Image: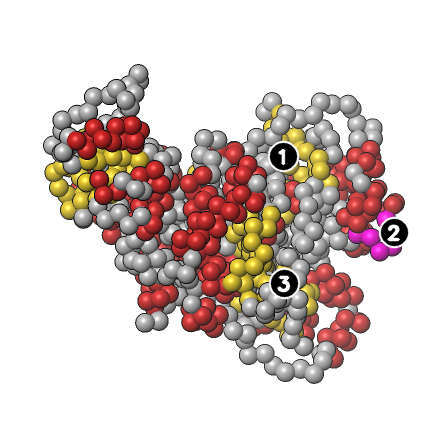
């Protein structure tokens, strides 16, 4: 069982991430029996079948996939993965904020992919609450990345009031 | 100017600690060079030709004298006693030691300074008018807007990993002195018909490989909506800007691909969800920040100072310096003065530790302890009494800070170029030096009058060559340095991109080609025309013709390449 950071703690986690291999299609790929984050395309193609399984459902959005595509399905998900194919690809920050602030998603949002210590603070601010830190990295050390700054200027998910509305209070 | 409160200071201190930890982890091997790269860039640290280069942020160019003294001390302790001012109104140190950079950032934090977001694919230092607050033609002081934007953009959690860098400039005067039309976002502070204050928003301007003039995406945006609207602009860019090709990743490419109307529609749609939310700027916050930029305690003068008028009449050298260096001030009896960092034999924008200390002293003595760095790589003392001008000049001149060439041919904008910068295709400082030597007769320079000559060592265009009357771009042709010339660019309200005159030249040829271009102007001008006016009337052809007279036919240089930050 692998470990992730969730709500500021290191916890065991059983979820797998399914990525379509060469030659696999969303329609034909077999759905694993273990808890699995499914690609958006698989969810889109086989919603009824996935829900009929009765297992908790998780999907993941790639950085080019916006949350608009699942806006009406959020109640179906136990968790949503936001993929960072490279840590310098910043689209996932917008995706996470949109999920929280626009679509009101309250469940777990998990950063997957190239997830590193020095990005965790901004990810947390954008509403990501679980982090599958890249496997070759020390997850204990990465925890420190969540609390680099004691405050922030901007409104975001973790602090909906910008500093200027709190400063004068 | 803005002074930190305890929270501002704490955030900067925490940033230093974060950076120190990152450097330590890199040295311990747990943070790879590739992983460190974007992190160090967002703290201004490049790895250059000879080693690291540290770019220190000077928000909208404003410095207190104590901060400049600290920069002098840092340049002496950690570098080679020289700093270089950039077109983003920042300062670069070219010879720091990698392992000492956390210490330097710690020193900077002690005077409310930092190197945050001076590089990297994030929102960069906000730039503005060096005459902000004192220019007679301004609607209002733009600097409170800049500081509001500085805080909003600092450690913005959503926009730290954009497709590419993002530059914002603010102007509030009738004449644009902040090049807002050549920025990713340009803001012009305006009033609408109802008398409300707000900003006109331009988007998608920029230089680089594909120079583009910014387009108006919103004619009027009430001030309170400035931040949420920019959040919407940045979000659309962050999500849909190209990431597959670094040369097509700036917002200008997205705006051009969609068309500004469609881009604007997407922004408005995005904005409709966040408008009037908590990010809506409050009047209380704006006023809190604006109070930091309140005018200093000016003395009251009825009119011009008699001793100053007398000195102008009797001291020709002083009068010549004043003619080039003085900018009008909105308060009677005061002047804004530009100190030239374009002295003969000095790399444009370079300033020694001693000069920094002299300027700091001059600032304390004559200009309420504050100064501004200009994007043209000079220094402005914005609040000098007329009665102090002669004394200021006397001291500035002793320290090589009073070359009377502001706005003239030798007041060149010039990037560090291939001598230092790892991105450069060619050297730029030796070209500036050669031009300076060719045009070393001051009377001749005065006769030529207003003309801008800018030099960039590569297509990244740090030297703003695209918007110069005469632009010089270093290009690489099979490992050799060549220089492509453009004519007819300009900054300001009529910002225009210069046109390439033809095949590029060798370094040796450049001064004589510049001479040829100037000769055409001198021969053809009417009494009232500046270089750019004669160009506008005659077009490119006569300049082009003359530039190639007596030169071998040669093939055009291959398309110049823009390189990415490293």
Residue at mark 2: B526
Q: Of circles 2 and 1, which is in front?
A: 2
Query: Relative to B106, is B437 on the left or the right?
Result: right
Magenta span of residues: B525-530
Q: In which quarter of the image is residue B401?
A: bottom right
| Residue B529 belongs to magenta span | yes
Looking at the picture, tell me which residue is in the foreground, B12 or A14.
Answer: A14
State whether residue B394 appears in this view. Answer: no
Query: Relative to B278, is B525 on the left or the right?
Result: right
First in sequence, mark 1 or 3: give its number.
3
Query: Relative to B85, is B554 on the left or the right?
Result: right
Q: Which chain carries label 1?
A: B
Is the same chain shared between marks 2 and 1? yes
Task: Examine the rendered structure and indicate whether residue B439 appears above or below residue A64.
Answer: below
Whether pointer 2 and pointer 1 mark residues with C-beta atoms closer than 8 Å, the reply is no
Residue at 63% x, 83% y: name it: B300
Q: Mark 3 lies on which chain?
A: B
Q: Where is residue B513 in the image (x, y as percent from the top left)?
A: 76, 36
**In whole angstroms, how far apart are the C-alphas of marks 1 and 3?**
33 Å
Residue at mark 3: B173
Q: Which labelled disc corresponds to residue B474?
A: 1
Q: Quadrant of residue A155?
A: bottom left
Looking at the picture, tell me which residue is in the foreground, B422 or B265.
Answer: B265
Residue at 18% x, 44% y: name it: A6
First in sequence, mark 3 or 2: give its number.
3
What secondary structure is found at the residue carrying circle 2?
loop
What secondary structure is found at the residue carrying circle 1?
strand
**In whole angstroms, how far apart are the C-alphas of marks 3 and 2?**
29 Å
Residue found at the very far top of the displayed protein: A23
Is the same chain shared between marks 1 and 3? yes
């Amino acid at each position: 069982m692998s470990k992730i950071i969730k709500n500021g703690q290191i916890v065991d986690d059983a979820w797998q991430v399914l990525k379509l291999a060469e030659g696999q299609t969303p329609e034909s790929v077999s759905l694993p029996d273990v808890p699995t984050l499914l690609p958006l395309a698989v969810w889109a193609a086989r919603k009824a079948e996935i829900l009929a399984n009765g297992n908790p459902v998780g999907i993941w959005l790639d950085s080019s996939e916006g949350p608009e595509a699942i806006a009406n399905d959020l109640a179906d998900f136990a968790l949503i993965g936001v993929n960072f194919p490279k840590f310098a690809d910043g689209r996932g920050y917008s995706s996470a904020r949109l999920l929280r602030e626009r679509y009101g998603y309250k469940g777990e949002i998990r950063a997957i992919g190239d997830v590193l210590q020095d990005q965790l603070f901004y990810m947390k601010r954008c509403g990501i609450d679980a982090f599958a830190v890249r496997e070759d990295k020390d997850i204990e050390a990465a925890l420190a990345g969540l609390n680099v700054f004691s405050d922030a200027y901007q409104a975001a998910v973790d602090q909906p009031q910008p500093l200027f509305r709190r400063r004068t209070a | 100017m803005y002074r930190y409160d305890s929270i501002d200071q704490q955030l900067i201190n925490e940033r230093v600690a974060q950076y120190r930890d990152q450097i330590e982890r890199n040295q311990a091997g747990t943070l790879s060079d590739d992983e460190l790269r974007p992190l160090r860039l967002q703290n201004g640290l490049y790895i250059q030709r000879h080693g690291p280069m540290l770019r220190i942020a000077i928000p909208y160019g404003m410095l207190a004298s104590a901060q400049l003294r600290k920069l002098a001390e840092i340049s002496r302790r950690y570098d080679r006693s020289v700093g270089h001012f950039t077109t983003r109104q920042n300062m670069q140190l070219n010879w720091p030691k990698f392992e000492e950079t956390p210490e330097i950032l710690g020193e900077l934090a002690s005077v409310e300074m930092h190197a945050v977001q001076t590089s990297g694919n994030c929102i960069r230092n906000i730039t503005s008018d060096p005459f902000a607050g004192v220019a007679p033609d301004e609607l209002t002081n733009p600097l409170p807007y800049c500081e509001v934007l500085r805080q909003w953009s600092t450690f913005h959690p959503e926009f730290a990993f954009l497709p590419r860098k993002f530059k914002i400039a603010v102007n509030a005067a009738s004449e644009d002195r902040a090049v807002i039309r050549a920025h990713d976002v340009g803001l012009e502070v305006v009033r609408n018909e109802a008398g409300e204050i707000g900003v006109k928003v331009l988007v998608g301007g920029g230089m680089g490989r594909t120079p583009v003039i910014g387009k108006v995406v919103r004619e009027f945006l009430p001030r309170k909506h400035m931040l949420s609207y920019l959040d919407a602009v940045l979000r659309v860019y962050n999500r849909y800007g190209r990431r597959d090709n670094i040369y097509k990743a700036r917002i200008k490419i997205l705006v051009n691909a969609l068309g500004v109307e469609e881009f604007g529609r997407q922004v408005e749609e995005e904005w409709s969800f966040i408008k009037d939310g908590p990010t809506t700027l409050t009047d209380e916050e704006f006023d809190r920040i604006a109070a930091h930029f309140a005018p200093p305690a000016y003395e009251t003068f009825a009119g011009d100072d008699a001793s100053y008028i007398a000195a102008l009449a009797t001291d020709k050298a002083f009068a010549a310096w004043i003619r080039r260096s003085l900018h009008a001030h909105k308060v009677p009896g005061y002047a804004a003065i530009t100190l030239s960092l374009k002295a003969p034999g000095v790399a444009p924008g370079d300033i020694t530790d001693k000069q920094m200390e002299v300027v700091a002293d001059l600032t304390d003595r004559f200009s309420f302890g504050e100064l501004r760095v200009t994007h043209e790589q000079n220094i402005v003392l914005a609040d000098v009494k007329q009665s102090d001008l002669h004394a200021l000049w006397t001291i500035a001149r002793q320290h090589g800070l009073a070359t009377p060439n502001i706005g003239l041919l030798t007041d060149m904008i010039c990037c560090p170029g291939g001598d230092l910068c790892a991105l450069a295709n060619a050297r730029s400082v030796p070209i500036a030096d050669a031009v300076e030597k060719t045009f070393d007769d001051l009377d001749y320079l005065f006769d030529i009058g207003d003309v801008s000559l800018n030099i960039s060592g590569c297509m990244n265009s740090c030297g703003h060559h695209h918007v110069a009357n005469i632009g010089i771009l270093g290009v690489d042709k099979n490992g050799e340095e060549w220089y492509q010339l453009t004519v007819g660019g300009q900054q300001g309200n009529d910002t225009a991109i210069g046109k390439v005159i033809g095949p590029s030249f060798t370094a040796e040829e450049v001064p004589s080609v510049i001479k040829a271009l100037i000769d055409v102007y001198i021969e053809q001008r009417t009494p009232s025309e500046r270089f750019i006016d004669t160009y506008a009337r005659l077009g490119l052809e006569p300049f082009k013709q003359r530039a190639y007279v007596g030169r071998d036919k040669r093939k055009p240089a291959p398309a110049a390449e823009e390189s990415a930050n490293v």
